[in-house]
Image (cartoon, helix red, strand yellow):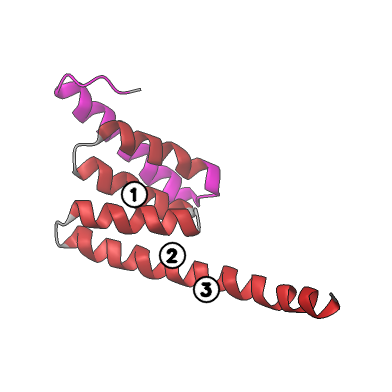
Amino acid sequence: MKTLLALLVAVVPAFADSQAQLAAKLNEEGKQLMFDGKYPAAEKKFVDAVARVPEAKYLFNLCTADYMQGKFGEALTACSEVAKHKPDEALKTKTGKLIEKIKADAASQHINVK
């Protein structure tokens, strides 16, 4: 039993580190896809990154990918999650501006978003 506990203590942090590294890699891949205009593929990368490590920057990128596809409701949901994951002041500001842009674009298209 003591050996199993020692193994778990050693493996769990390594697993968490590998998940964080994979999330960062997925985020970078998603950003490149966004740059290339491949928003649906980017969205999938960001969803996967958020599922592994729900960092504010990954959620912001997911929000942006959804917005670029015209998924205003989904974008607002992702943007609203940013604040729950300790964003820095710059990211808070960017998120607030994006939320306003999403709401304005939705209203101009007569789309009701909450």
Which quadrant of the figure has residue 63?
A: top left
Q: Dot 1 surroundings within 10 Å: few (below 14), some, or many (20 or more)?
A: many
Which residue does the image show at 61% across and 76% down from the upper left? Answer: 14
Can you tell which of label 3 and label 1 is closer to the viewer?
3
- The numbered disc on residue 4 is none
Q: CA distance from mark 1 to mark 2?
A: 13 Å
Q: Earlier in the sequence, mark 3 or mark 1?
A: 3
Q: Element type at marker 2? A: helix
Q: Is residue 16 above or below residue 62?
A: below
Magenta residue span: 84-113
Question: Contact, CB < 8 Å: mark 1 with mark 2?
Answer: no
**Figure quadrant of the C terminus:** top left
Task: Find disc 2 in the rendering and name its residue.
Answer: 23
**Figure quadrant of the N terminus:** bottom right
Q: Is residue 92 left or right of residue 68?
A: right
Q: Element type at marker 3? A: helix
Q: Earlier in the sequence, mark 3 or mark 2?
A: 3
Q: Amino acid at mark 2?
A: Ala
**In the current view of this chain or complex, which residue is farthest to the right?**
2
Which residue does the image show at 38% across and 42% down from the upper left? Answer: 95
Q: Is residue 46 above or below residue 104?
A: below
Q: Is residue 25 above or below residue 55?
A: below
Which residue does the image show at 51% across and 68% down from the upper left? Answer: 19
Task: Find disc 1 in the rendering and name its residue.
Answer: 62
Q: How many marks?
A: 3
Q: Element type at marker 1? A: helix
Q: Is residue 70 left or right of residue 49?
A: left
Question: Contact, CB < 8 Å: mark 3 with mark 2?
Answer: no
Q: Amino acid at mark 1?
A: Leu
- The numbered disc on residue 18 is 3
Q: CA distance from mark 3 to mark 2?
A: 8 Å
Magenta region, mostly helix, strand or loop? helix
